[in-house]
Amino acid sequence: MERIIINKKTTAHELICGDALEVLDKVHKNSVNLVFADPPYNIGKEFGPLNKQLSENEYIEWCKKWIERIHRVLTDDGSFYVMAATQFMPYIDLHVRKMFHVLNRIAWFYDSSGVQAKKRFGSLYEPILLCVKNQRNYTFNSDKIAVPARTGAVRRLIDHRKKPPQRYSSIKIPGNVWYFPRVRFRMPEYFKHPSQKPELLLERIILASSNVGDLVLDPFAGTFTTNAVAAKLRRNSVGIEIEQKYFEAGVKRVQTAMESGAIGNKANHGRTPQAVNLHDFGELSS
């Protein structure tokens, strides 16, 4: 297992090349504020020699193992986002509900599928679950993710149900259907990875469900999009990736992100962050 810590005055980021199950076993209980898990989908995409395709039962059992470990490391007021292939998400949903409260079932949709279907409808979305341990105590920064309202406010309609009548609000909280373009070749954030998620997707998740200075964990980091966005938004982070080539790309990416600043103006508000001591996170840095 290889570890690199990228540390500045404001935030710290520990990047780990290793098996997620083994690393999660070394993480302290109740130490992580936000987890974003985007595991290999087990649908035939080539991630590397260590990510072989499993049978359906093997894959589901493997998912149960890391989900249970995530429950252990998540703080009592933390949030857990998990993505999966559409054919496996029902199984994951059923298992997650044994330990978490599912607040939202989100559909991330995009403009076109990677492979154009000819004998069925093309796949244009990926499901995401938002889960919490305590449905009465968790972080949700609605003001950080508000978007323009496109109904009554755009048409300048008046809501006569209110007294006195007033115009509809010009902003709203996003619903559970999100549109973000897929990461494509030659985009500035593109890395050669079969399932890279856009930074804008992670920006919404991190802004909504964590605060400046919190600790964000991605157990299947890929090219470390989560960690790069966490760095730009002044969160601390830990990322785990089993494939060496993606780990090496991720180290460079997070180092660059530490210098590039926040994604948007919304991230420039809030308290001054302090870098966490990653020795307090677990046995990873010992």
Image (cartoon, grey):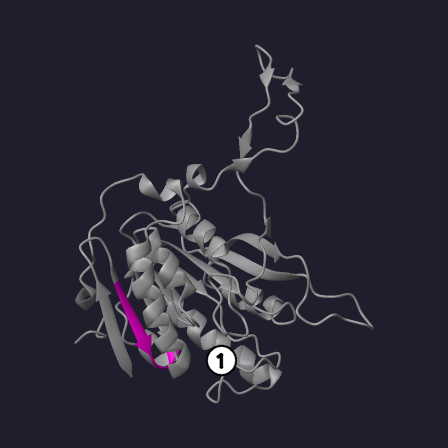
Give the structural element (helix, strand or loop) at label 1: helix
What residue did someone put label 1 on?
A: 62
Q: Can residue 281 be seen in this view?
A: no
Residue 155 versus residue 51 in the image, above or below: above
Q: Is residue 18 magenta?
A: yes
Between 180 and 74, the one lying in front of the other is 180
Residue at 27%, 75% in the rendered image: 26
Q: Can residue 6 be seen in this view?
A: yes
Residue 112: x and y, percent?
Answer: 68, 61
Residue 3: x and y, percent?
Answer: 26, 77
Q: In which quarter of the image is the C terminus?
A: bottom left
- Badge 1 density bin: few <14, some 14–19, many ≥20, Cα 10 Å: few
Residue 204: x and y, percent?
Answer: 46, 49
In magenta, the rendered stretch is: 13-20
Residue 160: x and y, percent?
Answer: 65, 15
Amino acid type at mark 1:
Trp
